[in-house]
Image (cartoon, grey):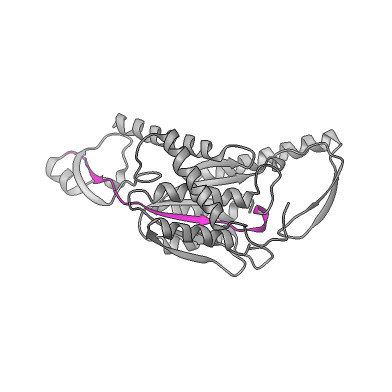
Amino acid sequence: MSTANPAITANPSVLRRLELDVTRRLDGILQGSYQGLVPGQGSELGEARVYQPGDDVRRIDWNVSARSQQLHLRETVADRELECWVIADRSASLDFGTADMEKSEMALAAAAGVGFLATRGGNRVGAVISSGAGLQTVPPRQGRLHLMAVLERISTTERADGPARNDLGATLQRASIVARRRGLAVVISDFLDEPETWRHPLAALGHRHQVLCVEVVDPRELELPAVGVLTLVDPESGRVREIDTSRGGLRDAYAEAAAAQRLEIRQTITGTGADHLQLRTDRDWILDLARHITGARRRRANVGGRR
């Protein structure tokens, strides 16, 4: 666990390596050109069609329905330009890692993966970042140089901890205010705040945007190894506790409580209508991201084919 360094160590060479990893590996996995991570439904009106059970009733065109005496839906033309917002959590709990990287580094990698995909085709990327000095907002702009500046801001932002920090709920509320244009919102966090503090702000964000929640997890948060007495420090509260990991009952209770916590997090996220992606510090995050993207696109294609 690292608590001495208040910012993620990410020099330009690290960001360039992330760019190469994303562009080279994802190109090979995804196959093809992508306008963005997920194409938007669009706001430009298209053709009308007959309403079918299961369609969104908010898109009913009442004028056409009245003239034809049959319910019609107004289709929208898919946006070719996507506005993507990265909502990055920099709470102290992310400065922890026991595998290939710390959770804060995984969060930066996730932001890079989403960002480099979203900027293709001229899409704009902005960010809302929680920090020790308050919430930071980076307006959305196009281009690789702007994205690199966004990633640099995330990587060098002083972490947010202590009683004065902005919790995840407050960060999501700020994102709902500044992200006015309908688009994609990607929330990157370990989601360790109490779910009731961020459930409603997340649902409110989803009223206007498609939301992807990237949950960053370290394997030691899921189970404890038998390594004797451990001294644990909560980086956000400063509480210190010693536990004897040689006790099998304690390890089993820890794993059960951790599984229940992660289940509650996943259910809270999906209950708001957001997509959920878990990235672990001991797994191939690029492969997990690619699998999520291809799965999401396949599901959307199947839904479109049934209409």
In percent of width and height, residue 243 lies at 85, 45
Q: Is residue 23 visible?
A: yes
Is residue 201 at least partly visible in the picture? no
Residue 124 location, x and y as percent?
37, 56
Q: How many marks?
A: 0
Instruction: Please give left or right for residue 120 compared with residue 148 in the image.
Output: left
| Residue range (magenta) | 70-94
Residue at the bottom extreme of this rendering: 133
Instruction: Please name whichever residue, 242 or 249, is drawn nearer the observer in this view of the structure.
Output: 242
Quarter residue 283 falls in: top right
Q: Is residue 174 above or below residue 192?
A: below
Q: Is residue 65 left or right of residue 264?
A: left
Residue 92 horizontal/vertical position (percent) = 67, 58
Q: Residue at x 46, y 48 (%)?
A: 114
Measured as percent of width and height from the top left, residue 62 is found at 20, 48
Tell me what residue is drawn at x 31 percent, y 51 percent. 81
On the rendered structure, is 9 left or right of 291? right
Residue 305, quarter of the rendered image: top left
Residue 107, placed above or below residue 293 = below
Identify the residue at horizontal 34%, vertical 47% (top origin).
40
Q: Is residue 72 magenta?
A: yes
Residue sticking out furthest to the front: 13
Residue ID at (27%, 52%): 43
